[in-house]
Amino acid sequence: MKRKNLFILIFLAVVLIVILIVVSYLINMDLKYSEPDIVILSPDGKFELVIREFDVLGGSGAEVYLKDLNNKKTKKTQLVFDDYTMPFKNDNYIINWADEKVVIKYYEGVPSQNINEPDTWSVSEIKK
């Protein structure tokens, strides 16, 4: 009886590990990028903000890159949204360029936010 229980336990552990590997693969595969990149040029023309919005397993988010004049693209941050909202695709964002940073305001659609009041939107600041 103990041997049978041990076999069942090992079998379940192997199945769980396989499931975790498959889920990890699905989350990290490149197919999560279902939308084209959004590229926003800085007012001085020295930088491009590149936003790669994605959706995976019912959630969504965006990776934010800054590209300089030498075409060097650096990942600055990753934004994660509460559910399947895509503020950049839906044009619900504001970009403010400052001397040393870029301020990104975006509407996630959560109850504490109001789409008509950008002051209630989520904010992310990145350094140039």
Image (cartoon, rainbow, N blue to C red):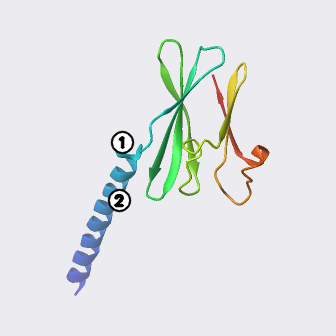
Q: Residue at x 73, y 54 (%)?
A: 113
Tag 2's secondary structure?
helix
Q: For the point 75% across and 44% down, which residue is it?
A: 118
Label 1 SS: helix
Looking at the rendered structure, which numbered label has been put on residue 13?
none
Between 19 and 7, the one lying in front of the other is 19
Q: Would you call the spot at circle 2 few (<14 residues within 10 Å), some (14-19), or many (20 or more)?
A: few
Q: Is residue 128 left or right of residue 55?
A: right
In the image, residue 94 above or below residue 80 = above
Name the residue at 64% across, 44% down: 92
Quadrant hosting residue 64:
top right
| CA distance separating discs 1 and 2 | 18 Å
Residue under label 1, please give it.
Answer: 30
Tell me the amino acid under the disc marked 1.
Asp
**Which residue in the rendered view is the most extreme toward the bottom?**
1
Residue 100: quarter of image: top right
Residue holding disc 2 = 20
**Residue at (28% x, 61% y) in the render:** 18
Coordinates of residue 103 in the picture (x, y in percent): 69, 32
Amino acid beneath label 2: Leu
N-terminal-most mark, 1 or 2? 2
